[in-house]
Amino acid sequence: MYNVKKENAGSILANRAQREAEYTKQRERERLKDIKKQQIILARNAQCTLNEHCAELKRLGDIAETKGRIGSAIAAEISRGKAMGFYRDQPPISYDHPVELFTLLVRVFGDELARDIAQNRLGFKPDQLRLSKDKK
């Protein structure tokens, strides 16, 4: 074997440990750079996908609107808003005066669309789908 003095052996081991630590740090930096590059690529792809998705929902909404299917057009717009993060999932709202609210919906949207909104979007029960007597 090598004839190494005890003083030199300690410094040789310290130098080796330092080189290994530097090499490890360099590899970690390279890994972080690769991870950051991958994150940027994924974010760009996700954004592109979100834009395409929203554009398709817009196109479908426009088609529904031109065919007079306002309910479908509204649903497409709501879906677009959800995809873009404008809406959060929330528990159903309880209405203190559902008959009065339904009456207002009929005034604004007409009977058919108001029924669709009340039942499918707001979760009204059939007995709540009537007009208030004083607001007809």
Image (tube, grey):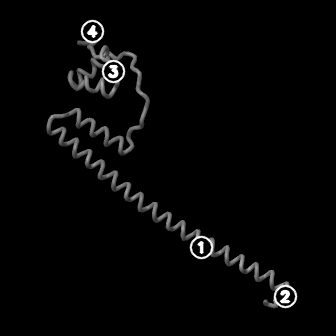
Circle 1 SS class: helix
Q: Earlier in the sequence, mark 2 or mark 4?
A: 2
How far is disc 3 from disc 2 in space, using C-alphas?
90 Å
Q: Earlier in the sequence, mark 1 or mark 4?
A: 1
Q: Earlier in the sequence, mark 3 or mark 1?
A: 1
How far is disc 4 from disc 3 in space, using C-alphas?
20 Å
When asked about the image quadrant of residue 5, the answer is: bottom right
The x, y position of residue 30, in whole percent, is 54, 71
Mark 4 belongs to which amino acid? Asp
Q: Earlier in the sequence, mark 2 or mark 1?
A: 2
Circle 4 SS class: helix
How far is disc 2 from disc 4 in space, using C-alphas?
106 Å
When asked about the image quadrant of residue 7, the answer is: bottom right
Q: Which mark is residue 26?
A: 1
Q: Which mark is residue 124?
A: 3
What residue is at 43 percent from the left and 32 percent from the top?
A: 90
The x, y position of residue 72, in whole percent, is 23, 35
Q: Which residue is mark 4?
A: 134
How far is disc 1 from disc 4 in space, using C-alphas?
78 Å
